Image (tube, rainbow, N blue to C red):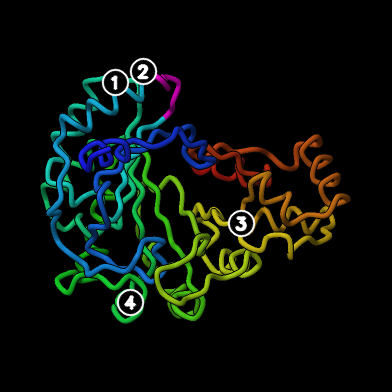
Amino acid sequence: MNAIESVQNNIIFGPIQSRRFGTSLGIDLSPAYKQCDFDCLYCELAPAAAVLKQTDIVNPETIIKELQKALAEHPYIDVITLTANGEPTLYPYLDKLIEKIKAINKSYQILILTNSAALTNSHIFNTLLKLDKVKLSLDAVSPEIFAKIDRPHKSIDIKNLTCKVKEFADMHTKELYIEILFVHGLNDGDKEIQLLNSFLKTLHNVTRIDIGTIDRPPAYPVQGVSYTDLVNISHKFDSSLPIHIASRTHAESNISSYTDKEIVNTLDKRPLTFKDIELLFDEESKTRLQNLIKSKKISIKLNGNLKFLVPSQNLQRKRRKS
């Protein structure tokens, strides 16, 4: 196999069954090697200097050809995910590629996984507005912690970035996700969490905020936080924010017993999925939860692809407000 064939074989991957986004077929817009404007401490890819543009570029026609072959083999997917060995918004033909993907079949939704930095570019900003689903990473909002954890290109300023994230949230009319990855001893302190909380409360039209930690071997010698820590961190965010714990690291260590009142209070403070329940509740508590659902004290609310458990009175309050 020659180098060109090797790259082509690495462009499309999946389908992947994603709890958060459904059945996904991925497109790697930098299949040869890492090209990114960040060099995050937790990245599973080898360390590489942050860059502002791709130098190894796959043409859109090659990508579309490989995508069509994959879709012929796997037609029953929910979403086409644009990602990269690095940052997908560095791909210079992103707008053209998105139009070509839409022309194949308008029933497929398109998702991009981006670190948010390119939102300061007006052309990319407008391109991302066209997408059905956008997931923006935002690990920190203070300049010091942002520089330590994400190691961005020197030209990237966190204040400009967050201003554009807020503007994008105001303008994007479809599904918008924010992802925060917590690293032990860096962005998991109360000060940074409160800064993130204050900023996130200013955003409009956010479908969900996913919080997680390191699940794969990182590029640098850093550690994630435990699932228990993530649960505690989730409680430090305002209850109005749609926080979802996306990581399952060390989940087995947090099985506990809950009374009826504690279940309602816990779900009032932070809605949980059934997967969260499996990781947090003992068997008797699960039975109590089922009884609360049957008695309609607890309801199920759909958020994106996930089903959350919330106190029924919370839904009633929101209906009355609306």
Neighbourhood count class around disc 3 (C-alpha, 10 Å): few under 14, some 14–19, many 20 upward: some
Asked which secondary structure carries label 3, the reply is loop
| Label whose residue precedes the other's in the sequence (2 or 4) | 2
Q: Decide: marks 1, 4 in contact (CB < 8 A)? A: no
Q: Confirm whether residue 284 shows in the render.
A: yes
Q: Which disc number belongs to residue 248?
A: 3
The amino acid marked with disc number 3 is: Arg
Residue 179 coordinates in the image, percent (x, y): 42, 56
Q: Which disc number belongs to residue 106?
A: 1
Look at 50% across and 42% down and name the residue there. 20
The amino acid marked with disc number 2 is: Ala
Asked which secondary structure carries label 1, the reply is loop
| Label whose residue precedes the other's in the sequence (1 or 3) | 1
Q: In this rendering, which labeled residue sits more in front, label 3 or label 4?
A: 3
Position of residue 24 relative to residue 213, above or below, is above
Residue 228 coordinates in the image, percent (x, y): 66, 67
- The residue at which mark 2 appears reads as 72
Q: CA distance from mark 3 to mark 2?
A: 34 Å
Q: In this rendering, which labeled residue sits more in front, label 3 or label 2?
A: 2
Please name the predominant secondary structure of the magenta segment in the image.
Answer: loop
Q: Decide: marks 2, 4 in contact (CB < 8 A)? A: no
